[in-house]
């Protein structure tokens, strides 16, 4: 992996290859990010993976001291994230290199980051929101397509990426559906300057989750990925385990009312998010039959539990690099 793939993303972050190890709830950790940087890519961790602000601060400091590359943190900028102000302040004080925003209006986050030179990449699912975050001053757009793991969009990457490239003047990073080097090459050929990859990194030795969760990424296929809107009111992908098959995946009429009502939605989303994350945490870290594992269809390309370095190496096969253009 000596050859470099130079794009807008690699130039912005000073990395060798245009890949972000995506921020994954409960999965992403400092070990994974350090290994990602050692391989010439970058990694990002959700702030919500840390129970306290002190834990978040310590993690950022540890990464800054031990990571030979850019450090990224993912912030939920929705109103139900009561810790957002403290999380953002900590990120800026400790000097992260970039922030990825999700599930809300990123304007105040962008405004706070701009004077300090901290890059902000914003998750979007359509052109309307892409133009909006561009007008706010985002440094790049993360185009979340319908093949993403976790919260996903409604458009396929073949439609979404060219649409955003044509109509936006800032770089486009694609999120979703990259299972191998051929997929990486295809996404770059559509005009994206990089990719955010999550699911293949779940089944890695460095991930501090249960072996059952890792093995599920190996054993299940893309046909086993189902979508539910009962966690936060937004569509989210999970593996269709025997336990999931016993559940209702779609929100009821009453739930939809509370998710959308302007007076109740903030509190109801927070309540459901708290309940959902508790289920995810139990499934990811403990042995339980109530398995609700988050993953995307790119698990199709995972054939074994590997190291982070091996996952990166497999994506950056020399054949793919030599044929990138």
Image (cartoon, rainbow, N blue to C red):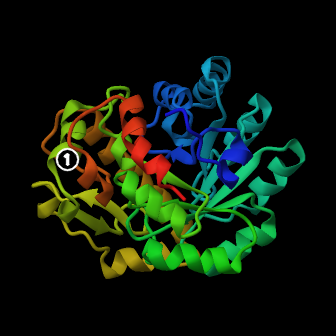
Residue 318 appears in view:
yes
Check the image and report above or below for 306 versus 217. above
Residue 17, horizontal then vertical, whole percent = 57, 43
Identify which residue, 236 or 268, lies in the foreground.
236
Q: Residue at x 79, y 67 (%)?
A: 136
Counting every numbered tag in the picture gives 1
Camera sees residue 150: no
Residue depicted at x 43% and y 69% = 233
What kind of element bears circle 1?
Answer: loop
Asked if residue 285 lies left or right of residue 148, the reply is left
Give the crowd class for mark 1: few <14, some 14-19, many >=20 residues within 10 Å: many
Of residues 178 and 152, the one drawn nearer to the viewer in this rendering: 178
Q: Residue at x 68, y 65 (%)?
A: 105
Res. 247 image quadrant: bottom left
Quick one: 294 or 148, which is closer to the camera? Answer: 148
Q: Residue at x 66, y 80 (%)?
A: 166
Label 1 sits on residue? 291
Does 72 sit above or below residue 166?
above
Indicate left or right for 127 with 145 as reference: right
- Residue 325 point in image, percent of width and height: 55, 59
Question: On screen, 172 above or below 48?
Answer: below
Q: Position of residue 272 (x, y in %)?
A: 40, 59
Q: Is 252 situated left or right of 173 in this image? A: left
Residue 185 picture location, percent across and down: 46, 58
Which residue is farthest right? Answer: 115
Q: State which quadrant residue 80 falls in.
A: bottom right
């Amino acid at each position: 992996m000596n050859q470099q793939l130079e794009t807008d993303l690699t130039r912005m972050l000073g990395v060798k290859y245009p890949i972000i190890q995506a921020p994954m709830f409960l999965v992403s950790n400092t070990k994974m990010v350090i290994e990602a940087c050692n391989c010439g890519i970058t990694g990002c961790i959700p702030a919500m993976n840390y129970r306290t602000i002190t834990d978040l601060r310590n993690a950022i400091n540890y990464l800054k001291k031990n990571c030979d590359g850019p450090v990224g943190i993912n912030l939920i900028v929705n109103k139900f994230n009561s810790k957002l102000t403290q999380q953002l302040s900590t990120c800026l004080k400790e000097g992260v290199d970039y922030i990825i925003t999700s599930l809300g209006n990123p304007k105040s986050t962008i405004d706070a980051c701009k004077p300090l030179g901290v890059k902000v990449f914003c998750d979007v699912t359509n052109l309307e929101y892409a133009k909006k975050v561009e007008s706010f001053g985002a440094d790049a757009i993360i185009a979340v397509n319908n093949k993403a793991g976790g919260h996903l969009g409604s458009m396929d990457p073949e439609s979404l990426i060219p649409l955003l490239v044509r109509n936006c003047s800032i770089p486009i990073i694609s999120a979703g559906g990259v299972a191998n080097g051929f997929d990486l090459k295809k996404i770059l050929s559509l005009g994206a300057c990089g990719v955010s990859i999550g699911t293949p990194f779940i089944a890695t030795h460095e991930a501090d989750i249960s072996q059952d969760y890792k093995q599920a990424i190996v054993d299940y296929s893309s046909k086993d990925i189902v979508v539910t809107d009962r966690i936060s009111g937004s569509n989210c992908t999970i593996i269709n385990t025997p336990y999931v098959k016993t559940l209702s995946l779609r929100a009821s009429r009453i739930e939809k009312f509370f998710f959308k009502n302007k007076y109740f939605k903030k509190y109801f989303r927070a309540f459901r998010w708290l309940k959902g994350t508790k289920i995810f945490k139990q499934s990811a870290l403990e042995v339980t039959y109530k398995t609700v594992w988050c993953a995307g269809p790119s698990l199709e390309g995972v054939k074994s539990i590997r190291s982070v370095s091996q996952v990166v190496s497999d994506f950056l096969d020399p054949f793919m690099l030599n044929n990138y253009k």
